[in-house]
Image (cartoon, helix red, strand yellow):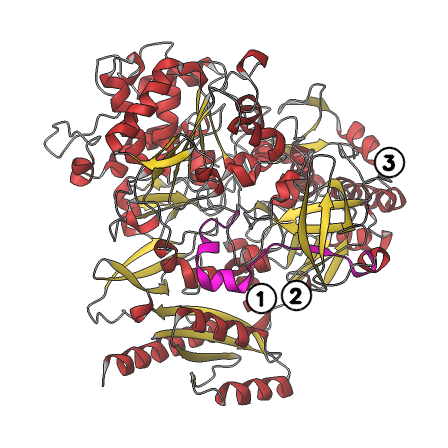
Amino acid sequence: MDRRDFIKATAMATAVAAAARLALHDESEAQARPADGVTWDQTPGRFCGTGCHVQVGVKGGRVVAIAGDQKADVNKGLLCVKGYHVGLALYGKDRLTRPLLRKNGKLEPITWDQALDVIADRVMANPAGFAMYGSGQWTIPEGYAAQKLIKAGIANNQIDPNARLCMASAVTGFLSTYGVDEPAGCYDDLDRCDVLLMWGNNPAEMHPVLFSRVIDRRSRGEKVILVDLTTRRTRTSGFCDRTMFFKPQGDLAIANGIAHLLLERGTWDRGFVEAYCNFRKRTDPPTLDGQAMTFDEYRKEMAAYTPARVEELSGITPADLSYLADLFGDRTLRITSLWCMGMNQHTRGTAINDLVHGVHLLSGHFGKPGDAPTSLTGQPSACGTVREVGTLAHGLPGGLVVGKEEHRKEAEAIWNLPAGRINAKPGYHTVEMWRRFSTAKDQGGDIDTIWVQVTNPARSLPNIGALFEPSRKLPGKFLIVSDVYPTATAMAADLVLPSAMWVEKNGMVGNSERRTQQWFRMVPPPGEARDDCWQTIAVARRLHDRGHTGMKDKDGRFLFHVVDKAGAAVPVWDWRRYYDVNVDEQLFEEYRRFSRFKHKDLAPYGEYVKARGLRWPVVEQPDGTWRETRFRFSKADDPYATKADVQFYHSVTKDDRALIWFHPWEAPPESPDRDFPLWLCTGRVLEHGHTGTITMRIPQLHRAMPQAYCEMNRADARALGIADGEVVILESRRGKLELPVWLGGRGEPMAGTVFVPFFDESIEINLATLEAHDPLSKQPDYKKCAVRVRRRGKA
Amino acid sequence: MVISSLVLTLSPVPEQRSLALASLASDPRIEIGQAVRDRLPVVAEAATAAEGVALCDAMAEHAGVVRVDVVAIDFGEDA
């Protein structure tokens, strides 16, 4: 038997075992992988927030094989098509391998030493104007180091992540409803629900491994009702029992309409509400606490949302609304709601999040396996790094915030900082940070340097013609980009730093179900590419050596004091010494001290090495083992819920109750009119992550989905005389672009709407989008603005 | 040579299922295992990763195939 025969025989055995496991629901021990000179280790996937576990085979310093991890709870040994390519993501031909500095308009190679000096010069010249812009693709230690540099060191709080653009409204929704962020439920709900209700969500493409868990149940004969609330027919729609098309912004009316019918029919859960809930309405200006209202006042407000009124606002028929209310009114069913960008990228994002939580609370569909309102994230560590580590401009680790004196004191104690080091004023949120970077200094543009890590704002910001492009022409503005490939942002930068990615470095991430995951470096990065975390620490050390007082704690120790087993300091800012110790472990052990404040307890680093991730709160047991929590706030599973079956122990109202909010339907900031008669919705596709900086470099994925397109309703296209494949001009009041039309393709938007994915750097759809954002979450609305589409050559 | 372990979920419609099995069996790059209920273990062999992906995509497009799950891939020299 030669190597090929051996691999084929092994491959068939693996496939047979997986087929049997899936068909028979057999959870028996997974088989070991054959060695064949290949070293196997486990890691989370790289592309999305699902948190699939992958086995990576390495030989000769290269990734040569990939397998789904059969011991992983999340993906149960399976991968989607992106997983097929995750190993190849490292090997794009144009990896960045040397630092580059723009001189006379051209990026030219420099040394790392020179690059660190350039950054230190910028900080020392104007520390108040220096900002970092990061990502939900930062690992936990990377994000932790970056926010410590900015909040404990430079102390201006000017740091925000791209996750502001994708899930900030979910954060404010959880905070305003439960007093603490992140879902109560977990993926186990998908295995237990009777109804899966998707609110503007397309998991068949965006989270296919999760969606397949539900489809698998159906194929085993279980009855699961799938309902798709959407503005566009998607691959998900094809699996659903009911697909309900609603007008953009109509989701607010639908949620209120369900509540209206529950109240009118008396099918709301009086016992649950009286035991566990209070009512709230918004204030002006809005706050997360809102204003108390009585049940009768709530009922009176909801009285306006009759089926007829909801139909007028949303387009959903009274019959469909009644169907939804019937589901929620039936306590024998278990209902899981899923959402992602559709609800979050919304100028009323906090409100719609509140309302969906409210429907679950009002109907008592909460706190039991399968009964859960659950938001999904799009990036591998939007939860772990952004929400938990606190890389948002107002945040501190563990759910603390810079605006509260007691929180600053806690952080200063853990970081051993002098009292008052942490600035009480939040930094700028993403839109404001980039607006100020793209505004001249004498006109209020007080951010003059931004260091971008692991994201591509030149393509992902809204209204890039206003928020990004002006900065590239203004004197005194300096853009630093750490990345693995020459993205559009990197190519527009003044300084480019080559980064290591995924299994080229140690890492930890946190997925959408509160699961923290860990991996070790498996292969070396190419050329001079180095870990983002090292880059941050090396800059901090350069500032320390220049005398920046913020880079020392109150005892004069370096902010990133890393020691060996004997307790001796290790100069990890020297790249040659960086892997002498496990920097991730030491940062994580420091960080996890924050996790107790909001009952987001994390276990010691070593526990994550042993597990395929653990869902917080992870609490030590009397026998010394560590137990994860699947269902938060539920006495049956959450060790902190001790007083009642359901206990919201971080309640806004300090009485262990969640808040049911009333928010009215409101018009979006821009709607179609005579000049711009169509709605534009943007989004993602199965093959590509976000702006496609990695996946578009994988030839197989590029070939599968090579170019962005304008998806139109066929009736709209006919009316405009537009043919399938024709290149058209799409324009809004902010910008225009040319792109081909795809009719009857993968999806089809409702009449009057168009859809354009944003993965293609060459088709800048964010020239057209709107930076208007939710007043609380500051998350912009990429899902609705007014555009027109016309044939080339036509006025 | 890129070798993939796959599990195909077959359609519950007998005619579509039969057509899918016949179509898969006619491709020399595909080796079919014994189906377990609606799950069909398959090994696909392709010259390059690109060809492997195209093969997966083609299987997924077949009316008799509900979905294709990837279990493992050996990239061989294509990594």
Check the image and report above or below for A416 versus A132: above
Q: Chain of mark 3?
A: A
Type of amino acid at the residue the image marks with label 3: Ala
Q: Give the mark nearest the N terminus, 3 or 1.
A: 1
Secondary structure type for disc 2 = helix
- Report the disc number at residue A215: 1
- Distance, label 3 to label 2, CA atoms, is 33 Å
Depth-wise, is mark 3 or mark 1 nearer the camera?
Answer: 1
Crowd class of label 1 (few under 14; some 14 to 19; many from 20; radius 10 Å): many
Q: Residue A142's spot in the image, x, y percent? A: 35, 36
Q: Nearer the viewer, residue B22 or A218?
A: B22
Depth-wise, is mark 1 or mark 2 nearer the camera?
Answer: 2
Q: Residue at x 53, y 48 (%)?
A: A690
Q: Residue A458's spot in the image, x, y percent? A: 53, 37
Check the image and report above or below for A770 versus A401: below
- Report the disc number at residue A304: 3
Q: Give the mark nearest the N terminus, 1 or 2.
A: 1
Q: Which residues are magenta?
A: A691-716
Q: Nearer the viewer, residue A520 or A473?
A: A473
Q: Please give the residue where the numbered disc 2 appears in the rendered image.
A: A239
